[in-house]
Image (spheres, rainbow, N blue to C red):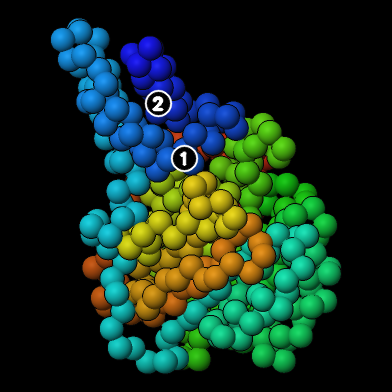
């Protein structure tokens, strides 16, 4: 009986491990990118059970252990960069002029959540220069507008479809534009933010729809939106920040491809996963809320903030402009196959790089 149960579990682990290797975009394939940590934990538990329960004299027992160990190693390969032993991709900042700092808070509020006071308290406590809210409708906008005296520069797109978006800033925003890149009811926001030092940073805030049985059968819309923005910022001399709820995990094929094509860095590498969803279920959490940036910046800090009633935790990141030290940083590199895959994913939707608003300094 033990052998049958263990063999069945190993079979499921193998399927969960092999499915994401496919380039298929169906939601039930791509969503297997998400629980790599959970799959690795299950594989480790099964490996321990095999060591105690299987008869090593049987030919199949060592094979099961080898297969389980291989799956565990493969899953760990994806998530180890988001653990502390791994080298940091982004350098920790040293002293810099206060005028070259930018602090950004991102928060998916969960539209039915009514704890606006909780979010406003976090904003007033942590004092971000810019905060972006996702899933905000008119009800949320009416209550967040109490912050306008402190954050007079805004971009507002209240929607009732769980894809509303708002940006509030106490730094000037220039050449700002709200776009609907891939879908007519899913906005993205693009602008230049002007630091007190007068340095201008290009910012892009995104919230593409996820592949899921309740949203889209495939990941093509999400993938195309991420990758056209990636291509639009690749190789720029202008400092760049891309942030938002990308409805994808940090270690997925698509997010890694985004990083390769864009050349942007992930401050979580070597520091932790900073899982933001699901706030109510500790055993099912993934890093869905992201901030990527160009080599112009080093990291002041990154923090996951307390729960305020949403199914996401907010994230607070402080970056310091330091072009000299930042030039030594290196992220993922794209090869020819990566560029071909990116073009293939973009071609699946009626969008092109030219559609992305490119704020001009």
Residue at 40% of width from left, 56% of height from top? 273
Residue 234 against residue 115 in the figure, above or below = above
The secondary element bearing badge 2 is classed as: helix
- Percent position of residue 81, x then y: 30, 52
Q: Quadrant of the N terminus?
A: top left
Residue 114 against residue 12 in the figure, above or below = below
Residue at far top of view: 59
- Percent position of residue 321, x then y: 38, 80
Residue 353 against residue 11 in the figure, above or below = below
The residue nearer to you, when weighing 161 against 220, is 161
Whole-number angstrom distance, CA of label 1 to CA of label 2? 11 Å
Can residue 41 be seen in this snapshot?
yes
The secondary element bearing badge 1 is classed as: loop
**Residue 141, image quadrant:** bottom right
Residue at 66% of width from left, 46% of height from top? 209
Residue at 33% of width from left, 63% of height from top? 271
Residue 144 against residue 21 in the figure, above or below = below
Residue at 29% of width from left, 41% of height from top? 77
**Residue 45, image quadrant:** top left
Point out which mark residue 215 bears.
none
Can residue 330 be seen in this snapshot?
no
Q: Earlier along the polypeptide chain: callout 1 or callout 2? A: 2
Give the side of residue 51 with respect to residue 342, left or right.
left
- Percent position of residue 259, x then y: 41, 52
Q: Quadrant of the C terminus?
A: bottom right
Point out which mark residue 13 bears.
2
Point out which mark residue 35 bears.
1
Give the side of residue 320 with respect to residue 173, left or right.
left
The residue nearer to you, when weighing 232 against 66, is 66
The residue nearer to you, when weighing 302 against 163, is 302
């Amino acid at each position: 009986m033990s052998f049958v149960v263990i063999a069945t579990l190993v079979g499921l682990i193998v399927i969960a491990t092999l499915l994401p290797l496919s380039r298929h975009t169906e939601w039930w394939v791509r969503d297997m990118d998400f629980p790599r940590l959970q799959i690795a934990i299950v594989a480790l538990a099964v490996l321990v059970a095999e060591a105690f329960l299987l008869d090593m004299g049987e030919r199949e027992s060592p094979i099961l252990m080898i297969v389980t160990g291989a799956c565990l190693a493969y899953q760990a390969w994806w998530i180890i960069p988001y653990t502390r032993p791994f080298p940091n991709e982004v350098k920790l900042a040293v002293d810099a002029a206060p005028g070259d700092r930018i602090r950004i808070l991102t928060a998916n509020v969960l539209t039915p959540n009514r704890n606006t006071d909780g979010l406003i308290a976090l904003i007033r406590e942590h004092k971000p220069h810019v905060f972006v809210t996702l899933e905000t409708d008119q009800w949320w906008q009416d209550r967040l507008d109490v912050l306008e005296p402190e954050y007079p520069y805004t971009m507002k797109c209240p929607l009732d479809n769980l894809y509303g978006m708002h940006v509030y800033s106490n730094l000037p925003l220039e050449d700002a534009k709200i776009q609907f890149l891939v879908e007519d009811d899913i906005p993205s926001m693009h602008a230049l933010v002007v630091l007190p030092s007068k340095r201008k940073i290009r910012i892009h805030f995104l919230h593409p729809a996820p592949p899921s049985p309740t949203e889209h059968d495939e990941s093509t819309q999400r993938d195309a939106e991420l990758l056209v923005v990636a291509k639009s910022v690749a190789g720029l001399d202008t400092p760049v920040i891309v942030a938002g709820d990308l409805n994808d995990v940090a270690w997925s094929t698509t997010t890694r491809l985004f990083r390769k094509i864009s050349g942007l860095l992930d401050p979580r590498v070597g520091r932790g996963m900073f899982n933001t969803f699901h706030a109510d279920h500790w055993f099912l959490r993934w890093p869905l809320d992201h901030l990527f940036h160009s080599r112009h910046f080093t990291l002041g800090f990154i923090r996951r903030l307390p729960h305020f009633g949403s199914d996401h935790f907010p994230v607070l990141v402080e970056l310091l402009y330091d072009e000299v030290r930042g030039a030594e940083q290196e992220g993922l590199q794209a090869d020819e196959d990566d560029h071909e895959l990116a073009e293939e994913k973009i071609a699946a939707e009626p969008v092109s790089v030219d559609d992305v608003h490119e704020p001009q300094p």
